[in-house]
Amino acid sequence: ALSLVAERGRGMADAAARTETGMTAVLGGDREQVLAAIAAAGLTPANDNGSGQIVAAGTTAQLAAFAENPPEKARLRPLSVAGAFHTEHMAPAVERVRAAADTLSPSDPVVPILSNADGAVVESGKEYLDRLVSQISSPVRWDACTQTLADLGVTALIELTPAGTLTGLAKRALRGIDTLAVKTPEDIERAGALIKEHAGTSAAGTDQEG
């Protein structure tokens, strides 16, 4: 429901205003070393995108200290965001959104949905709604979603607007599949043609944010 989306936005904005926090993309480097450095800095790997890209999130002070001692062979790129999303800093928003979610009676999805918490296939509307709420303060595991898409034999990926980030990652992690980022009304016709072309193959959706 759009009311839940609006409540989620208000809750996250309120949580972000309580503490000065932010996010920094870590590009390259050894995965285990990057994760260890993020943990040592007291940060959270808020987005694990695979393809050598992990987003660290936490307070601005923690991020500043992290920037002074980055992981070996990694590049840091501060992101222009309002706060440390998908971390404990968003906890105040969770209960607020949970209260709104409890008023809804979700139907089961007609196609499998992949949860970006762990890449699991979710076929229950109630479970999906529960995961949608807890996901507010939980890291995003797009790398796990990518693996599940590969395991399902997905042959094409369509990213809805605002689009471009996920198709870019997919081109590196899911080589050989067709991708389309829907950015303009004209792309809708192309999306329809792509769906027809790949009809009969595995289909799934993900709850990934942009």
Image (tube, grey):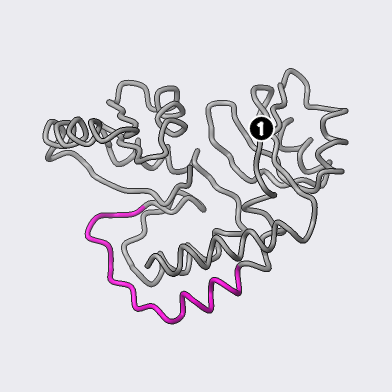
Q: Residue at x 37, y 40 (%)?
A: 161
4 or 202, which is in the foreground?
4
Q: Identify the magenta region.
A: 94-113
**27 to 64, vertically: above or below:** above
- List the residue tagged with mark 1: 25
Q: Quadrant of residue 91?
A: bottom right
SS at badge 1? strand
* Residue 112 on the magenta span: yes
Q: Residue at x 87, y 43 (%)?
A: 61
Residue 190, image x, y percentages: 19, 30
**28 to 113, vertically: above or below:** above
Residue 4, image x, y percentages: 45, 68
Residue type (three-letter) at the residue carrying disc 1: Ala
Q: Is residue 104 left or right of residue 133?
A: left
Q: Quadrant of residue 136?
A: bottom right
Q: Residue furthest top?
A: 73
Q: Residue at x 77, y 61 (%)?
A: 18
Q: Is residue 208 left or right of residue 65?
A: left
Residue 35, image x, y percentages: 71, 37
* Residue 76 on the magenta span: no
Q: Residue at x 64, y 46 (%)?
A: 46
**206 to 123, vertically: above or below:** above
